């Protein structure tokens, strides 16, 4: 890789770490923030746990638990 590509990769890694750390603010996990952002922007017919799982490339089980928690907290 070129020096520019290495520097860019380092910056992206730093940004990802900072965003991940911010995801733990307000007593929420990063996955919950991701779900809230997804549902706020997705078309209505794509606002399901299954579609969120497909969007994230994850299994339905963990995503369903995240959605259930958000529903219990009246955030969705």
Image (cartoon, grey):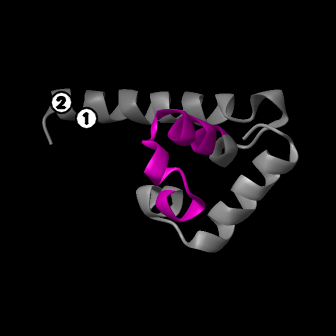
- Look at the magenta stretch and give its main secondary structure: helix
Magenta span includes 64: no
Residue 35 vertical position relative to residue 21 in the rendered view, above or below: below
Q: How many numbered circles does the render carry? A: 2
> Where 10 falls versus 31 (above or below)?
above
Q: Which residue is mark 1?
A: 6
Left or right: 10, with 7 as reference point: right
Q: Which residue is mark 2?
A: 3
SS category of the residue bearing label 1: helix
Residue depicted at 68% across the width and 44% down the height: 32
Q: Quadrant of residue 29?
A: top right
- Where in the figure is residue 7, as x and y percent of width and height? 28, 28
**Which contiguous range is marked in magenta?**
33-51
x and y percentages locating residue 45 in the rendered image: 45, 51
- State the SS at label 2: helix
Is 48 above or below relative to 6?
A: below
Asked whether, in this view, residue 59 is left or right of residue 55, the answer is right
Asked if residue 11 is positioned above or below residue 37 in the image, the reply reads: above
Q: Quadrant of the C terminus?
A: top right
Q: Label 2 near label 1: C-beta < 8 Å?
A: yes
Neighbours of disc 2 within 10 Å: few (<14), some (14-19), many (20+): few
Image point (54%, 33%), residue name? 40
The residue positioned 79% from the left and 48% from the top of the image is: 71
Residue 5 location (% of width, % of height): 19, 33
Nearest the eye: 17 or 49: 49
């Amino acid at each position: 890789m070129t020096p520019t590509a290495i520097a860019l990769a380092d910056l992206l890694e730093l940004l990802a770490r900072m965003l991940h750390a911010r995801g733990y603010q307000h007593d929420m996990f990063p996955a919950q923030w991701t779900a809230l952002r997804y549902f706020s922007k997705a078309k209505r017919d794509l606002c399901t746990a299954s579609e969120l799982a497909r969007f994230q490339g994850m299994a339905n089980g963990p995503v369903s638990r995240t959605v259930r928690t958000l529903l219990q907290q009246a955030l969705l």
